[in-house]
Image: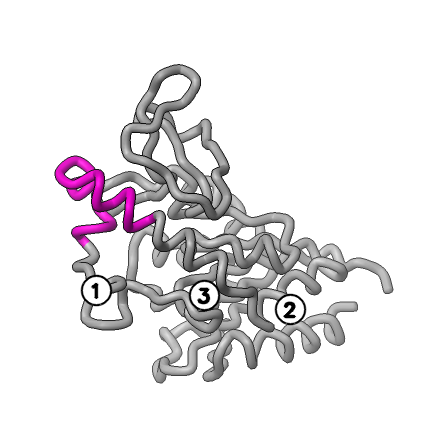
Amino acid sequence: MTKSDKKIVVLSGAGMSAESGIKTFRDADGLWEGHDVMEVASIQAWQNTPELLTEFYNQRRMQLATVLPNAGHHALAELQRCFNVQIITQNVDDLHERAGSQNVLHLHGELRKMRSVNSQSETIDIGYTASVYGAKNEAGELLRPYIVWFGEDVPMIEKAIEKIEDADILIVVGTSLEVYPAAGLLHYFPIENPIFLIDPNRHEDLSKSNLRLIKSTAAEALPKLAEMLVEKYN
């Protein structure tokens, strides 16, 4: 089977990780593992209670080690055999990578990594281990979780826009399309190209003629969608 020159971009969100057992901050009225989201996911929280945030992300890292990629993650990884696939994810977990996806752009950072408080470009992969507040890098700079918090810029958004603008097919899965700037990425996708929106709870079609709504979960829909795309374009 020859590999198609079609470029597929996948925009994934928290709903996809939730199917693997990772809780989201939208599960219970803005609470994330019992915390108000602004207490554990804002730059103000880091400035006010850095020890709390350090322990919170230690717990999230430990939880991540106990879950596995679901059928949706694996379907996207398999799709690489037939297409040029780029994942743009709002998730901070590594489930896409563990399933085998090779081109993954994390908009909101990566749970397994730490970075200097002075730089977003250099990171340290600590795996699923715990960190200690006050830890420093080799240059003596304080380390913090490599997470893009509320109140901070999203440094990868320009790269994401470039990927979206160049895509032939867009798959949106596990995201409410309510959190900006990620939600605005759809505006950069070529209007004549197809969008597949996978969401078991959405009713409206977003008034886009090129959009196909699939009311199903990621684990159920993505294997079927992948098979359909392979049959159509290969």
State the mark number for residue 119.
none
Could you tell which of marks 2 and 1 lies nearer the N-terminus? 1
- Residue 210 on the magenta span: no
Residue 112 showing in the rendered view: yes
From the viewer's perspective, tell me whether residue 27 is left or right of residue 222: left
How far apart in space, not on screen, are marks 2 and 1 (Cα)?
32 Å
> Which residue shows up at 32% across the image and 51% down it?
181
Return the x and y of residue 72 as percentages of the image width and height.
57, 70
Residue identified by numbered label 2: 75
CA neighbours of label 1 inside 10 A, class few (<14), some (14 to 19), many (20+): few
Q: Main secondary structure of the magenta part?
A: helix
Residue identified by numbered label 3: 17
Q: Nearer the viewer, mark 2 or mark 3?
A: 3
Q: Nearer the viewer, mark 2 or mark 1?
A: 1
> Which residue shows up at 44% across the image and 40% down it?
113
The kind of residue tagged 1 is Gly
How far apart in space, not on screen, are marks 2 and 3 (Cα)?
14 Å
The kind of residue tagged 2 is Ala
> Which residue shows up at 34% across the image and 42% down it?
154
Identify the magenta region.
Answer: 38-57
- Residue 43 on the magenta span: yes
Query: SS for tag 3?
Result: helix
Return the x and y of residue 147 as percentages of the image width and height.
35, 43
Could you tell which of marks 3 and 1 lies nearer the N-terminus? 3
Residue 161 showing in the rendered view: no
Could you tell which of marks 2 and 3 lies nearer the N-terminus? 3
The kind of residue tagged 3 is Ser
State the mark number for residue 34.
1
